Amino acid sequence: MPAPILLPTPAPSRITSVTYAHSGHLWESEHSENKGLSEALVVDIVALVLKRRGYSLRVRAKKQTGPDVEAVSPKNRRIVVEAKGEGRNSDDSYTLFVTALGQILLRMNSEDTTYVVAVPWHKRNVDLLRKVSRQLCRRLSLEFWLIAPATGKHDYDVGILPCDVD
């Protein structure tokens, strides 16, 4: 893995909660849209979660090609992330979601890697996520991470739908 790239500042200061899908909470999207979740901010939040879990990171610079985040755990578990920010309307949300899926599919080159699509946590994306086959996600080691602002100015909730959950 190439040398890590430092996160830009200001980075998110706190991850308020990380929720796994088996709680059922992911489907109850109470998060509002248009909260300023740019792709860069979604990438920063994902990187912060992974960094706090002990992963070594490589975050793609703006003009580089490749996945938005590549991470390796101390036990050599690899994660590849494609992130998207908020769209202006439902057509944008659909296009961004499908684009992220296509990008992650094109990056799949190892059975020992978990692939992640990270998007804002709101109703449009949750509705699209429900259409993705869980069986397919398991076969592809594909997870979805949903990002939403929490109560504080730089606080965020992260909902994770692991590939092994129905």
Image: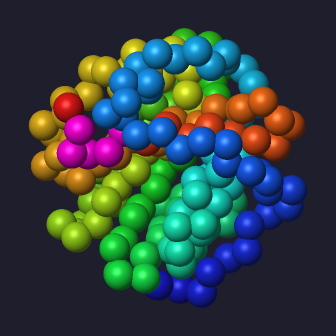
> Where does the image place residue 86, in percent across and percent down from the top left?
64, 28
> Where does the image place residue 138, in percent across and percent down from the top left?
17, 46
Where residue 155 sits, quadrant-wise, is top right
Residue 142 vs residue 24, the one in the foreground = 24
Taking 53 as reference, is 75 above or below it? below
Q: Is residue 21 left or right of residue 4?
A: left
Q: Which residues are magenta?
A: 161-165
Q: Is residue 38 left or right of residue 31?
A: right
Q: Is residue 36 left or right of residue 114?
A: right
Residue drawn at (41%, 19%) of the image:
27
Taking 161 as reference, is 95 above or below it? above
Residue drawn at (74%, 51%) of the image:
14
Residue drawn at (58%, 58%) of the image:
49
> Where does the image place residue 122, in percent across and percent down from the top left?
56, 20
Image quarter hosting the C terminus: top left
Does the magenta run of residues contain 39?
Answer: no
Provide the major secondary structure of the magenta segment: loop
Where residue 21 sits, quadrant-wise, is top left
